Image (cartoon, rainbow, N blue to C red):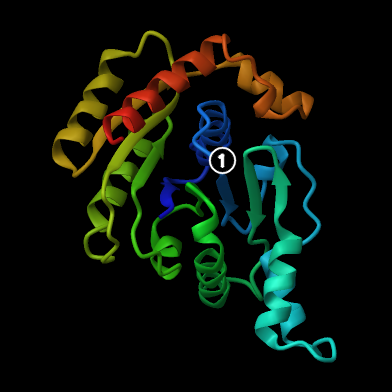
């Protein structure tokens, strides 16, 4: 059965960057096949992987409201379109949710995403869900369980505080989360004592472990500016070695 890796955190903390690096890690470690799901309406995971998106779940849902091809049931048409929407790459596939029906109209879109993931789940070892800010969208997806929840923060007091709040509301949302971690992105090196104190307090007071602290990286910035895929980052680069060490500790521990 596939394992679900979800990401949460306030906007701009690097959830999508982390998702792209997770794809690179799982493919490099041959923990495949992987399904990467961009569940953010402002989809850009494909850009970090240098992939073009033509069909989104939002577009499929709109097509299903119209006339179907003669001789096809709604389920048959949906299954065909879902497979057309999958962007297939070596070791992983990408699925993009796209825009909902209207401003703030996420419930139906998330339910549709949940149905799609149910249909595809058995084909993958890992499913990565790059989520909107907050946790509400994950709860609406009706995921049976989340094996790994990475709560992503930037190196700011507000980011760490938001991560703590997210960790605190996973219980009331009745999400089955097996392991949840705090991951701090773009941190200065060395980590300032005040930041380390905030991180230690958050981990101690909330129900989460510290996944790791990823240093700010010119390599990631330059890769994004050039439009080149994160998958092409050299595995002996400083940032990739640091990221892989963080993920190795987590996935080897839970193996």
| Residue identified by numbered label 1 | 16
- Residue 47 image offset from top left, x and y in percent: 72, 40
Find residue 173 and report its image quarter.
bottom left
Secondary-structure class at tag 1 = helix
Where in the figure is residue 118, as x and y percent of width and height?
Answer: 50, 67
Q: On the image, which quarter does residue 27 sit in?
A: top right
In the rendered image of this protein, does residue 240 appear above or below residue 4?
above
Residue 190 is at least partly visible in this image: yes
- Is 196 on the left-hand or right-hand side of 8? left
Q: Residues within 10 Å of mark 1 (few under 14, many from 20)?
A: many
Tell me the quadrant of the picture where the N terminus can be found.
Answer: bottom left
State whether residue 120 is above or below residue 182.
below
**Apparent side of residue 114 relative to residue 173 in the rendered image (left or right):** right
Q: Is residue 81 left or right of residue 192?
A: right
The residue lying furthest to the left in this view is 205
Residue sitting at x 40%, y 69% = 142
181 w.r.t. 143: above or below: above
Give the residue drawn at x 50%, y 59%. Answer: 122
Front-most of 172 and 68?
68
Does residue 155 appear anywhere in the picture?
no
Q: Position of residue 91 (x, y in %)?
A: 62, 38
Residue at screen point 42% across, 45% down: 9
List x then y, in percent, for residue 252.
32, 28
**In the image, residue 202 above or below residue 104:** above
Residue under the image location 58 percent in, 36 percent down: 20
């Amino acid at each position: 059965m596939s394992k679900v890796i979800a990401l949460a955190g306030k906007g701009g903390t690097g959830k999508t960057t982390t998702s792209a690096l997770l794809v690179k890690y799982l493919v490099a470690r041959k923990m495949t096949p992987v399904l990467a799901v961009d569940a953010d309406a402002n989809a850009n995971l494909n850009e970090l992987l240098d992939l073009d998106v033509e069909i989104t779940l939002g577009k499929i849902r709109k097509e299903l409201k119209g006339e179907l091809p003669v001789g096809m049931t709604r389920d048959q048409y949906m299954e065909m379109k879902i497979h057309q929407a999958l962007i297939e790459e070596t070791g992983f596939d990408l699925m993009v949710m796209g825009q909902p029906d209207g401003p703030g109209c996420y419930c139906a879109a998330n339910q549709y995403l949940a149905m799609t993931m149910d249909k595809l789940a058995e084909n993958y070892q890992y499913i990565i869900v790059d989520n909107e800010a907050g946790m509400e969208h994950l709860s609406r997806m009706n995921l049976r369980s989340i094996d790994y929840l990475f709560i992503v923060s930037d190196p700011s007091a507000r980011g760490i505080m938001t991560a703590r709040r997210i960790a605190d509301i996973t219980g009331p949302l009745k999400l089955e989360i097996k392991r949840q971690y705090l991951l701090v992105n773009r941190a200065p090196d060395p980590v300032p004592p005040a930041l380390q104190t905030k991180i230690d307090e958050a981990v101690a007071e909330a129900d989460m472990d510290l996944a790791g602290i990823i240093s700010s990286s010119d390599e990631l910035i330059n890769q994004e500016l050039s439009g080149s895929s994160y998958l092409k980052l050299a595995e002996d680069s400083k940032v990739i070695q640091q990221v892989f060490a963080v993920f190795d500790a987590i996935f080897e521990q839970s193996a």
